[in-house]
């Protein structure tokens, strides 16, 4: 059957009909808010390439968390900017560093908040790479021990979920073993399983005041040309004990998200990264696109592709809009 019997426009005829037949929806509880935590007190620093995003010291977090929760956000992920960096990223293991300190405060004052921590040493090393060095080589196996210890420090502080983003081989297994051995068998691992070597991380490196001092990350992050490799990475992480899989970035990799959603039965997280955020914000500021509509369309497309949850710098802005439209 076809026209004139079939008329798809019938199902678009009013806002109520469109809402009735809508296949995908976005809810604030599916959004994860990323937060940059800087050492010290009374700090709220703007980030040049990420309008409306700031680096906060721990004491300045509560009003922001209250605002986020008032519009329905229930989950956050923490990235730390330590006072001191060294070759080994030692400050990543400091229980009094910005991230563990923030975790303790948040779990005490906002017990219902899901607190996720990013586990990676790049922000803590002088060279800015995600692994320990042997000469100019990023050494996989010596890094594993450091990552597992870092995850344990976060779990001890009270993190609900640890999220390794380094792309070393075997880190999910190493982290699971150390957590279990120390009585943290309930701590969830959200693995950045499929993380591409992307140009869209640019503004994040600005935010974190990190970034590789030599070379690039293509010896550990994935080649944007590859699809099969994503399945392999995801399978390995599932075998090693990941509870949630992540694809990063989101919009340029919707095909990968779609494929993983069809192949794996774990919840899937998509990371709408700093460059995706900055692109929409910049074009919006110029008046070239409608920021709110582009934001919602991109978030919905990520859900449609198969993401259960979305990590996004738009979390509060989107949640506020969703709250208004209810
Ligand atoms: C590594 C890490 C990065 C991001 C999250 N975790 C940077 C990188 O791999 O270069 C990027 C996130 C973003 O761009 O929003 N710790």
Image: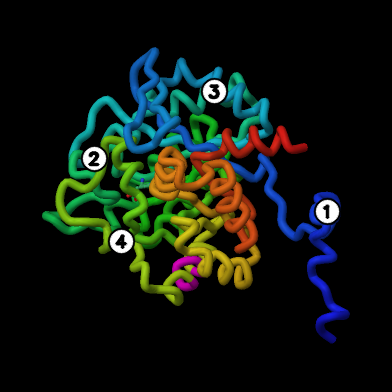
Mark 1 Cα-neighbour bin, 10 Å: few <14, some 14–19, many ≥20:
few
Q: Give the Cα distance between marks 2 and 3.
A: 28 Å
The N terminus: image quadrant: bottom right
- In the rendered image, which residue does mark 4 sit on? 220
Residues at circles 4 and 2 in contact by the CB criterion of under 8 Å: no
Q: Secondary structure at mark 2?
A: loop
Query: The magenta stretch spans which residues?
Result: 231-235
- In the rendered image, which residue does mark 3 sit on? 64
Mark 2 Cα-neighbour bin, 10 Å: few <14, some 14–19, many ≥20:
many
Disc nearer the start of the sequence (3/1): 1
Q: Give the Cα distance between marks 4 and 2.
A: 16 Å
Residue 16, x across and y down, in percent: 85, 50
- Does the Cβ of the disc 2 residue fall within 8 Å of ligand 1? no
- In the rendered image, which residue does mark 2 sit on? 125
- Does the Cβ of the disc 3 residue fall within 8 Å of ligand 1? no
Relative placement, left or right, of 2 versus 140 is right
Residues at circles 1 and 2 in contact by the CB criterion of under 8 Å: no
The C terminus: image quadrant: top right
Residue 208, x across and y down, in percent: 32, 36
Disc nearer the start of the sequence (4/2): 2
Residue 14's disc is 1
Query: Which residue is depicted at the point 27% across and 53% down?
Result: 142
Relative placement, left or right, of 81 versus 271 is left
Query: Which residue is depicted at the point 58% across and 26% down?
Result: 107
Q: Quadrant of residue 168?
A: bottom left
Q: Is residue 311 above or below residue 252?
A: above
Q: Main secondary structure of the magenta part?
A: helix
Q: Give the Cα distance between marks 4 and 1.
A: 50 Å
Q: Nearer the viewer, residue 271 or 276?
A: 276
Q: Secondary structure at mark 4?
A: loop
């Amino acid at each position: 059957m076809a026209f004139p019997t079939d008329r798809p426009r019938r199902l678009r005829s009013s806002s109520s009909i469109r809402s009735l037949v809508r296949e995908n929806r976005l809810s604030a509880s599916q959004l994860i808010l990323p937060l940059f935590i800087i050492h010290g007190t009374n700090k709220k620093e703007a980030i040049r390439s990420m309008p409306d995003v700031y680096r906060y010291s721990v004491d300045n977090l509560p009003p922001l968390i209250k605002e986020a929760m008032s519009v329905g956000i229930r989950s956050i992920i923490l990235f730390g900017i330590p006072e001191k960096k060294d070759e080994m990223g030692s400050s990543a293991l400091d229980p009094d560093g910005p991230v563990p300190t923030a975790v303790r405060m948040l779990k005490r004052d906002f017990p219902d908040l899901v607190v996720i921590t990013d586990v990676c040493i790049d922000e803590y090393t002088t060279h800015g790479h995600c692994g320990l060095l042997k000469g100019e080589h990023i050494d996989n196996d010596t890094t594993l021990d450091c990552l597992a210890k870092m995850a344990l420090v976060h779990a001890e502080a009270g993190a609900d979920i640890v999220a390794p983003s380094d792309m070393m081989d075997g880190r999910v297994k190493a982290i699971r073993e150390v957590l279990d051995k120390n009585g943290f068998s309930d701590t969830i691992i959200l693995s950045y399983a499929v993380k591409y070597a992307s140009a869209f991380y640019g503004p994040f490196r600005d935010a974190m005041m990190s970034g590789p001092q030599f070379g690039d990350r293509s010896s550990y992050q994935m080649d944007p040309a590859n699809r099969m490799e994503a399945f392999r990475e995801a399978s390995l992480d599932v075998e090693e004990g990941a509870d949630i899989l992540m694809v990063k970035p989101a919009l340029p990799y919707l095909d990968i998200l779609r494929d993983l959603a069809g192949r794996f039965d774990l919840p899937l997280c998509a990371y709408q990264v700093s460059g995706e955020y900055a692109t929409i914000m910049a074009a919006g500021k110029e008046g070239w696109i409608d920021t709110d509509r582009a934001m919602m369309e991109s978030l919905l497309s990520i859900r449609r592709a198969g993401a259960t949850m979305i990590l996004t710098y738009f979390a509060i802005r989107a949640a506020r809009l969703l709250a208004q439209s209810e």
